[in-house]
Amino acid sequence: MQQQDMLRMANQIAAFFNGSGPEAAVRDAAEHINKFWDPRMRAMLLAHLDKGGEGLDATIVKAASQIKRPKPANA
């Protein structure tokens, strides 16, 4: 997956949930990513967030602490 695609998808998730209020949007966006994104996608998103999250909706940035970090490949 390309980083640009990941950013677009994450921002679409945020846009969908942003109508439910800030706290619910953060919780629901993190829950959606945890349920439906495979570990590689989550790893890419979290790596981008670790670098500052440029280009990501504020909802996704705020949800970062609730997104499950995948186990390392060699674990």
Image: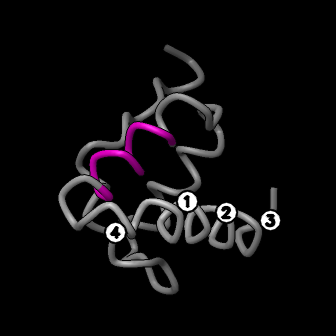
Tell which residue pokes out farthest to the right in this image: 1
Residue drawn at x 49%, y 40% is 32
Residue 33 at what x, y percent from top left? 51, 42
Amino acid on which disc 3 is placed: Gln
From the image, state whether disc 3 or disc 1 is nearer to you.
1
- Which residue occupies the foreground of this view, 40 or 23? 23
Question: Is label 1 in a helix, a strand or a loop?
Answer: helix
Q: Amino acid at mark 4?
A: Thr
- The residue mark sitting in front, 3 or 2, is 2
How far apart are the two marked residues, 3 and 1, measured between alpha carbons?
17 Å
Image disc number at residue 59: 4
Label 1 environment density (alpha carbons within 10 Å; few <14, some 14–19, many ≥20): many
Mark 4 and mark 3: Cα distance apart in space: 21 Å
Q: Which residue is mark 1?
A: 13
Question: What color scheme is it?
Answer: one colour
Tell me where residue 74 appears, x and y as whole percent. Answer: 56, 18
- Label 2 is placed on what type of residue? Met
Secondary structure found at label 2: helix
| Mark 1 and mark 2: Cα distance apart in space | 6 Å
Q: Which residue is identified by label 3?
A: 2
Instruction: State how far apart marks 1 and 4 are (Cα).
Output: 9 Å
* Residue 28 painted magenta: yes
